[in-house]
Amino acid sequence: MVIKVFLASSSGSTAIKKKQQDVVAFLEALKVDYTQLDIACNEANRMWMRQNVPEEKKPANGIPLPPQIFNEESYCGDYDTFFDAKEDNTVYAFLGLPPPPGSKEAAQADKAHIVENGTHAEGNDESTEVPVEERNGVAHRKKEQAADEEGEGGEEVEGETADDEAAEGETAGDEAPAEEEETVEETDEQAHAEQEEQEEADDEREEEDLQSEEEEELRQLEEEEEAEVQEEEEAK
């Protein structure tokens, strides 16, 4: 199986160039065999790419932009879906390739297989659980011992009660620092939430910039096609 990456070598869009470099660099880092197919210098590559991208995966204008990724004849996805797979450590699944042993994706697949088949950890083995009869017997013996101690030494029991009340008083005194810790945690959570909102806003602005660059690239491609058609008509 050969991974095909359709690129535009002479693209004037900085965003598209960055996306193409990101895909190629990551595939090389994973040592995945792939082939680059240029749609800028080869009209056959451009037409094949456009015809084989599924209709539901094409943008609203119907013209998919590079990079587009295929596994032989099977469509894998564009840069956005590739980026999501990279973030989720599922690139091999995205490419339709088996993950190599020892990789994060292989470890995730093994874990998912264990969960799916209902395999439990040894620590959760129910065979080591104490039978109900034994638990009830222990509880009954503890009750009898407590009753005997109460009957034999009432003063000792009263002393223990006083100690318990003193311990409760100390516990109550410790509640104030706990409340302060909760306040600090809430402040940290609020700061973290504000930071996430700022990052989301930055991501949205970056996506808008990329979209503008993609629209400009599309406009340039359409102008190039119109110029080619016009040259062919004049040549005739």
Image (spheres, rainbow, N blue to C red):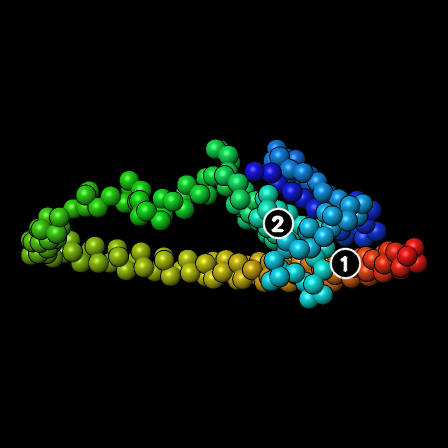
Q: Quadrant of residue 164?
A: bottom left
Q: Position of residue 139 (x, y in %)?
A: 12, 53
**Which of these two is toward me, 131 or 2?**
2
Residue 234 point in image, percent of width and height: 93, 58
| Label at residue 49 | none
Q: Decide if residue 114 is on the left or right side of residue 87.
A: left
x and y percentages locating residue 117 in the rendered image: 32, 47
Q: Residue furthest front?
A: 236
Q: Give left or right: position of 104 versus 47.
A: left
Give the quadrant of the C terminus: bottom right
Q: Circle 2 is placed at which residue position?
A: 82
Q: What amino acid does circle 2 point to? A: Phe
Q: Residue at x 89, y 59 (%)?
A: 233
In this view, the residue in front, 29 or 71, is 71
Q: Give the left or right position of residue 53, taking residue 103 as reference.
A: right
Q: Which residue carries the number 1 mark?
A: 214
Label 1: element kind: helix
Disc with the residue nearer the chain's start (1 vs 2): 2
Badge 1 local density, few (<14 within 10 Å), some, or many (20+)? some
Q: For the N terminus, which image quadrant?
A: top right
